[in-house]
Amino acid sequence: MGTMLIQIRSGTMMNMDTNVLVKLSQAALDMGHEVKVFAYGEGVTALKEGQEPKRFPNVGKILQEQIAQGLSLAGCETCCYARGITRGEEFDGAKIGSMTNDLSVFVSESDRMVTLAR
């Protein structure tokens, strides 16, 4: 099976992009693909621990479940800090990383890349 990289650049409450992210990543995992997700820009909000949306899917919780299934998730450190998210505020299994050390590796290891952004 192949490896899919999904870059998410939309925030968890901005639009439906994060819902597409978790549905696409779950479909790929179910088909036996390796899935890597890199969050950039507003997309880093998906890494934040303790989100409790009332009328929207809990993307953070879904991503944690997918991490348990083998999904790799990293977010841009600069983007996190610009939004007030610091190390230790990400949920278990998520990584605050960098474009150089994480995104570049994810790209080199992946067969396909999808970007979800507005």
Image (cartoon, rainbow, N blue to C red):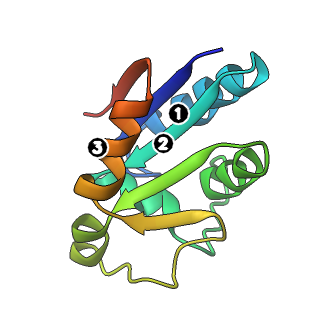
Residue beneath disc 2: 37
Q: Which part of the image, by quadrant, shows the C terminus?
A: top left
Question: Does residue 31 appear left or right of residue 97 in this picture?
Answer: right
- Residue occupying the point 34% across, 32% down: 108
- Residue occupying the point 69% across, 20% down: 27
Real-space Cα separation, disc 3 to disc 2, in angstroms:
12 Å
Q: Nearer the viewer, mark 3 or mark 1?
A: 3
Residue 90 in sight from this viewpoint: yes
Specify which label sits upstream in the sequence, 1 or 2: 1
Which numbered marker is on residue 104? 3
79 relative to 50, above or below? above
Question: Does residue 36 appear left or right of residue 63 in this picture?
Answer: left
Local secondary structure at mark 3: helix
Which one is nearer the viewer's eye here, 25 or 54? 25
Residue type at mark 1: give it. Answer: Leu
Question: Does residue 1 appear left or right of residue 84 in this picture?
Answer: right
State yes or no: discs 1 and 2 in contact (Cβ < 8 Å): yes
- Residue occupying the point 45% across, 52% down: 13
Q: Which quadrant of the structure image shows residue 33?
A: top right
